[in-house]
Image (tube, rainbow, N blue to C red):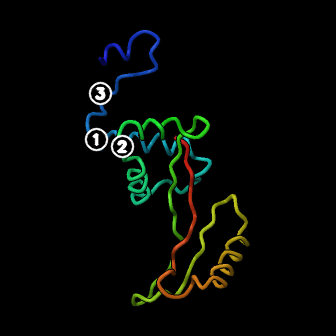
């Protein structure tokens, strides 16, 4: 079967280095980051974000996997939840840092903090959570 996939006008190439599930995932994440540098910028995927993506790519059957691969307008996407930074002192949240990428002016962070204050999100257990999502194309 491999011989059939890699001969003729095939787009496939045999990669003997990809023999384990871990090596397949690592290759997948390298390609994902490579194809989405404009979105990710200098902040490549963390291990936690890679686990989020793995969970999104766990399908109950082949039909669901095929629907995802067909994507929206032919583009399959995954979403990554990135959280802001909250500094804790003795387990208490003391400083909240609103993270923004280079595409957003720093004043957006200021306005987001103000919105958190209005929505009471800087009090209690919700501290440090954000609704930032990164959509990456596969």
- Residue at (53% x, 57% y) in the render: 43
Q: Residue at x 57, y 51 (%)?
A: 135
Residue 59 x %, y %:
37, 45
Q: Are marks 3 and 1 in contact (CB under 8 Å)?
A: no
Q: Secondary structure at mark 1?
A: helix
Are the residues tagged 1 and 2 within 8 Å (C-beta)? yes
For marks 1 and 2, give the CA distance: 6 Å
Number of residues whose C-alpha sits closer than 10 Å to that of mark 3, classed few (under 14), some (14–19) or many (20 or more): few
Mark 3 or 1 closer to N-term? 3
What residue sits right under mark 3 in the picture?
16
Query: Does dot 2 land on a helix, a strand or a loop?
Result: helix
Q: Secondary structure at mark 3?
A: loop
Q: Is residue 91 left or right of residue 37?
A: left
Kindly indicate the quadrant of the structure image that contains residue 46.
bottom left
The quarter of the picture where residue 100 lies is: bottom right
Q: Disc 3 or 2, which lies upstream in sequence? A: 3
Q: Residue furthest top?
A: 8
Relative placement, left or right, of 122 versus 59 is: right
In screen coordinates, is 88 left or right of 120? left
**Mark 1 Cα within 10 Å, few/some/many (few <14, many 20+)?**
few
Q: Tell me which residue sits at (69%, 81%) in the image.
A: 114
Vertical order, 52 against 4 (above or below): below
* Residue 86 picture location, percent across and down: 50, 79
In the image, is residue 114 above or below residue 134? below
Query: Which quarter of the rendering shows the N terminus?
Result: top left
Residue that numbered label 2 is attached to: 25
Look at discs 3 and 1 and give the one toward the viewer. 1
Q: Which numbered disc covers residue 21?
A: 1
How far, Cα to Cα, is label 3 from label 1? 13 Å
């Amino acid at each position: 079967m491999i011989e059939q996939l890699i001969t003729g006008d095939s787009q496939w190439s045999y990669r003997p280095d990809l023999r384990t599930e871990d090596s397949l995932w690592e290759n997948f994440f390298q390609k994902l980051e490579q194809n989405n540098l404009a979105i990710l910028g200098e902040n490549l995927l963390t291990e936690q974000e890679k686990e989020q993506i793995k969970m999104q790519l766990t399908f109950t059957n082949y039909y669901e996997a095929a629907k995802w691969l067909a994507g929206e307008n032919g583009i399959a996407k995954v979403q990554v939840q990135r959280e802001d930074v909250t500094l804790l002192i003795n387990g208490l949240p003391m400083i909240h840092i609103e993270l923004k990428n280079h595409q957003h002016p720093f004043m957006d962070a200021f306005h987001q903090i103000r919105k958190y204050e209005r929505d009471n999100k800087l009090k209690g257990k919700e501290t440090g959570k954000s609704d930032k999502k990164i959509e990456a194309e596969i």
